[in-house]
Amino acid sequence: MTTTLRSNIEVRLGWSWRDRIGPFTVIDDNRLLFNKDLSDGVETWQADTVWHAADVSLETGQFMTLDLSALGQSLFGETIVIPLAKVKAILIVNKSTAAGASLLVGGSGVDEWSAPFGMLGDTVRVMPGSPLLLANVRDGWEVEPGYEALKLEAVGGDVVFDIAILGTSATNGGSPSA
């Protein structure tokens, strides 16, 4: 199977801030925008594979560990395995809105992938009703043998989330194995 991937990472934070200072109204309408298209491939500024899951449910204290070197996905009418060599971006959206129901990302302990977190054992928390985007769009973070486990754990309440991981394949051809 030959595949082609076109991908885009777009993040926007906008605001309209108005303040009254004496007889004057001060207005700050602005936004910060990042928008980058990645071409198909395994080099700098490229990605050739994506893995995603929607409406994943974890009860409080429950966790799942993703093996970034062998992500299973039902796609194109069959089950495929996506072996990542590099991660260019991870987007996680915590759809739960209950106070405290957050998703702890990282800190798997065994075979831990910690590249975007700094050190083994480090984690980041995706708060209720919030997104988390981790990106290294230019070069990507390496997924090395023995360091490919990404843990996702529900803490403080049940969590429902969506996740997408954009990267380059270990097969250097963009065609995941069936």
Image (tube, helix red, strand yellow):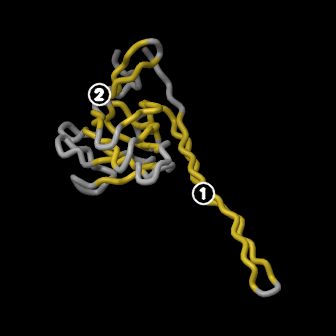
User: Which amino acid is tagged 1?
Assistant: Leu
For disc 1, the neighbor class at 10 Å (few under 14, some 14 to 19, many from 20) is few
150 with respect to 45 (left or right): left
Task: Name the residue tied to disc 1.
Answer: 13
Camera sees residue 75: yes
Dot 2: what SS? loop
Question: What residue is at 17 percent from the left and 42 percent from the top?
Answer: 110
User: Which amino acid is tagged 2?
Assistant: Ala
Of the pair 54 and 112, the residue shown nearer to us: 54
Question: What residue is at 73 percent from the left and 72 percent from the top?
Answer: 18
Spatial CA distance of label 1 from label 2 is 34 Å
Furthest residue toward top: 77
Furthest residue toward right: 23
| Numbered label tally | 2
For disc 2, the neighbor class at 10 Å (few under 14, some 14 to 19, many from 20) is some
Question: What residue is at 32 percent from the left and 26 percent from the top?
Answer: 171
The relative height of residue 14 versus residue 94 in the rendered view (above or below) is below
Of the pair 155 and 88, the residue shown nearer to us: 155
Indicate the quadrant containing the C terminus: top left, top right, bottom left or bottom right.
top left
Question: What residue is at 33 percent from the left and 22 percent from the top?
Answer: 81
Residue 138 position within the rendered picture, expressed as x and y whole percent measured from the top left: 44, 48
Residue mark closest to the camera, 1 vs 2: 1
Residue 34 is marked as none
**CB contact under 8 Å: marks 1 and 2:** no
Indicate the quadrant containing the N terminus: top left, top right, bottom left or bottom right.
top left
Residue 164 position within the rendered picture, expressed as x and y whole percent measured from the top left: 45, 36
Residue 70 is marked as 2
37 with respect to 138 (left or right): right
24 with respect to 150 (left or right): right
